[in-house]
Structures are given as C-alpha cells and as structure tokens.
Amino acid sequence: MAQVVQPRTVAVEPPHGETALLDFLGRELDGDWTVYVQPFLNGDEPDLVALNPRAGVIVFEVKDYAEGAYSAEEGVWNVHDARGTHRIASPVDQIERYRKNIVGLYCPEIGEEVDQDPKNLATIRLVLYFHRMTGDTARNLCRGAHRNLIVLGSNELRDGALREKCNEVRTGESRIMRPQWAQSLAAWLNPPRHLEEHGRVELTPEQRRHAQPTEGRRRLRGVAGSGKSLVLAHRAAARAARGERVLVLTFNITLANYVRDLMRRATPYPHDVAIITHFHEFCRLALDKANRPIPHHPDAQEYFDTILPNGVEDAIGSGVPESFRFDGIYIDEGQDFRRNWFELCTRFLRAENSEILLVADYAQNLYERESNWTEDMRGLGFRGPWARLSQSHRLPHRVRDAAWEFARANRLDTEQLLPPDGQQELFHQDLVWHDERDVENACRMVLRLYRYLCDRRQAHPQDIAILLPTHKIGNVMVAYLRGQGQHPNHVFQSQEGDHRRNKKTFWMGSRGVKMCTVHSFKGWESRFVIALLADTTFENVGAERLFYVALTRCREGVFFVNTTTRIERGATAWNALPQVEDAAYADFTLARVREGAEDRRNLKDFGLLDDVPF
C-alpha cells in the first residue's frame, strides 16, 4: 500500500472525487510509492502527486464535472448551465502546465534529460480523473490530447485499472527515472515546515532601516549593488514568518529564483504562504484559479503588455477569491513593470492598507517602459518621496567608479554609487576590456578567460557568470563546454524541429558556470562576470542601460570581450587582458548557428517570451 503524505493542513474537506481516487491509489500502488495530497508548488496545486524513486512521477488532477454539462472542440472547453454556455480552462492544458513547470522550474535536471531526448518526458505521467463521468465520455472530451495522457472515469476505479494503462505502475521500474530526481522533487512536494538555508547575509544599517514589513504602499529606490533585492527578500520573509500570505513578483524567472534563495537565507517561514514568481506566470496562476483559459494573441509584445493582464482583470471582475489574496506584495525591478501591471497587482491585496512594496532602479530600465510611470505615480496611493539605498556594497571600487562615470556620461537616471561605510576594498579588482574582430573569435576568448579564472585565479565554476548575446550562440557554447566535460547551468532555449526546449533556470547555489543573456542576469550577481558584447546584444533595447547592467553584476571582476561599436569604452582606466592560452579552444566554431542567426534576435533572446512557461 502506498504511503500517503499531506504536506499542509487544508481547512476544507477534500472533494468526493479526490477521496475516491486516493482510496483507489492506496490499493493500486505498492509501498514504494508515496502519494502527496494537494502539494503546494509555488502556487501550483495539483490534487495528487505519486512519486517512486525507481518508477517515476504521476500527476493526478480530479474533476467533478457532471456528465452532459461539458463539451470540448479542438481543445476549447465549455460548460453549459442555466446561464448559458461559458468557456472554461482546459483541464488538459492545466495538467500539462504542471508537468512543464516541474521539468522547467522545480526540477530542471529532468528538463536537461528531456532536452537530450523528448521521450524522457515520459518519466512524469499525467492522469485526469473525472469523478462524475464514464471513462468513454471523459476520453471523448479529451480527444486530441497527448497520447501519453491517461484519462479515467468513475466506472474505472477498479483494481488493476491503472496498472493496465501505466507500465511504470505495473513493473515498479522506469529506464528513465533517477533517484536524485525523486529527492529533488520530494523537497518541493513536502519541504521542511520552515525553509532555511545556510549562508545568511547580515544587513547593513542602511539596509536594516528598510527591511521590516509595514502597512500601506511603499517604494524604494537603490543604486546598483545596494541590496535592493536583499532588502525586499528580508521584508517579504519577515511577513511570511508570521504565517501571512506573501506574493513576490519579478519580471523574469531567473530573478524570481534569486529572490527565493535570498528569502530562504533571511528567516525561516512556512513554505505554503509565499508565492515567488514572475509577473506573467502569476497571471497564468490567477487565470487558473478562476478556471479561465489563457488568452492568445499573434503580437507577443501586445500580448504580454496588455492582452494577458486584461484577461486577468476580466477574470477577477466579480472579485478575487479570499484564498488568493495577500497580506503583502513585493515587486522587484519595478522599472521593468508597466503601470497597468501594478494596478492589477493591487487588486490582490487582502485589505486596502495591506503592504505593497515597489523596488526600482530606473538606470536599469532595459525594456523601454513608459519613462514616467515610476516618476509620475499620482493616483496609485503612494505618499511621500521614495525611500533610498545609496551605498553600493557589491561592487569593487574600480567598477563602482567606472559605473558612475558611465552613468553620468550617458545621462542614466541614477545617483552616485557611494562606498559602503567601513567596508574594506579588495586588493585585486578586475576591470578588463578586450576587442575582437568577430563573434566567433570573441567566443574563443570568453572560453580562454573562463579557463584563466578557474586555473589561475582558483575560481570555482559556480562563481563565474558568462553573459552571451543570443540563445543560439549560448546553446553552441553550452554544447561545446559539455563536450569538454563541463556542466554549465544555463537558461538558453532553442527550437529543433517541433521540439522546443524547456526553460532552464539556475539558483544561487547551483553548481557549474552560469550562462545566460544580460537580460536574464539582471538583478543577479556573481564573483566574476565575463560578457560578450555584439551588435545583437543591444538590439531592441537601450545599449547604454544594458551595458550598465552588465558592468554592475560582479563582486570582484568583470571582463568585456567586445565586437561592437555600439558602446564606447570611454576614459575608464581598463586593465590589460590577463595572460591566457592563445591557442586554447581553437577548434570552437559557430557553425551550428544558422547563417545570419547572430545578426537578428527576437523577443525570446532577451528574456521575455522564454520567461513565461506556457
């Protein structure tokens, strides 16, 4: 008999369908399986998840849909009631999103194997159970879904029914499943009562003044390296530690992961009171809670700016459920948001005076948002001036001075980056600029600098970040490093035939060199940063702001390998290129990048499309 784990206390009685399915699984699954009841996966709440370290994962979603009251045509689902016909979210899409988030967000190591062979996705099986329908009726509604989706009706909860349809249940084994994947997923399905990690960071006096939660609408500005995300994380974690519900929003996935790590280091808190995600994924969650389908639109920019948020606004027109209201909402990199996004977020506050904190640095406004929305905030409920963080704690003094010089020369809207009080400066600080004639040779130099930092400076790979112009170039470099026995952590996607790679994410403590675009690394930091600058680096965004972001990500040194004339090196006293092995990596080639791929880029190359996992 399977072991049953209920990771959290749920106030309401489970629906009859869920109880019936749980009783069935208790008989159907042997003792090697563990069934988790209503686990909380950062806002995703599948009804049941079964896990066997040798056989795989099964995600179950239960629907109490009455037979005859629902219809589906080409994936579009409708319910028919006394008020008429209304479109609802597709349960097939819902359960597919659960699996996609598991492999792309929670356990990206599984996603890496799916990258190598899409058949590995079968390690996570999906089961839809319709408690008030026959199996034939339910499967007819789900026709056209992926052939690996198992659909069961109430007449099929008999002994052996799941074993007949699922080989992993029948044999108790899978050629794909790895025990370490089970450990990783179990940590999400049933985390400790309070999440805590080593490496807690002590706040400075300036940061402590802004780190305690309060009431009302608050805003905080800070220079690069001042600890804006750290303050936000401490403030959100302090509220979550009280057992109050917290929502933390960023613009992209990678920054959400970074803030989550900071919160874990700040103070212990119950795992199921905090949702930490990016804005568009939160929109998806809100539509899911409202049982509304996710809208589509051919223009990606318009879709993310207005269509998707407007869909949420329409879904909550009659009110936000109490279960999806928050005592505190915390928005990082607020300059990347839009005014309508912020206004939508306020709808999810529990009370009028509940806290909402907006953190921003307009000098890092990469996405060309309305230049005045964080300047003219009349009508949004804020009072008084912005609170400010002026001391840059991350940057070594040479990089800090170079950043301020560059910001002044290019009229970026930021304050002078002040040195921290009483902090000793590093003796060895790297501020390197090197020109190369083309992108391919620049890639070779990036690899040589990576080897130099590992071999000559004894840097661990996880202390190095490599920032590249496009996802296509990134994929080629990732494949090359893997061939050299390296294990890079990256966020690059590519499309090979009909298989679109899963979004990859990295975390603060993840092993291996981190590789991504500048856009995906905004808000992050690393001991060393190596950045390849090409014309495609700066397409669709302000070149000066993007360069400023890349310049201000390091704690010890930054190395620019440049092939573009879009950025001038200026009067900064740059270090000479360190002694590297000139002949190393001569076999590297960009031949796998299609001709012209490095000349143009689309939205997904600067972290917009890829950061929305649906």
Image (cartoon, grey):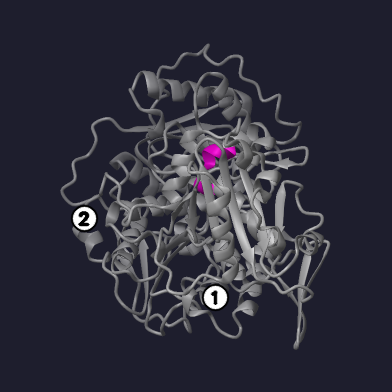
Instruction: Tell me the kind of residue under disc 1.
Output: Leu
Tell me the SS state at disc 1. helix
- For the C terminus, the image quarter is bottom right
Q: Give the percent coordinates (x, y) of residue 558.
A: 41, 35
Q: Which residue is drawn at 59% across and 32% down?
A: 563
What separation in Å lies between label 1 and label 2 (alpha carbons)?
A: 33 Å
| x and y percentages locating residue 311 in the rendered image | 66, 73
Q: Nearer the viewer, mark 1 or mark 2?
A: 1
Residue range (magenta): 105-111
Is tag 1's residue or tag 2's residue first in the polypeptide sequence? Answer: 2
Left-right relation of 369 to 3: right
At a point 39% along the width and 70% down the height, the residue shown is 245
Question: Which quarter of the figure has residue 535?
Answer: top right
Residue name at image x 54 percent, y 24 percent? 481
Q: Which residue is drawn at 42% across and 39% down?
A: 571
Which residue bears the numbered disc 2? Answer: 204
Q: Is residue 117 above or below residue 508?
A: above
**Looking at this rendering, what residue extends furthest in the bottom direction?**
82
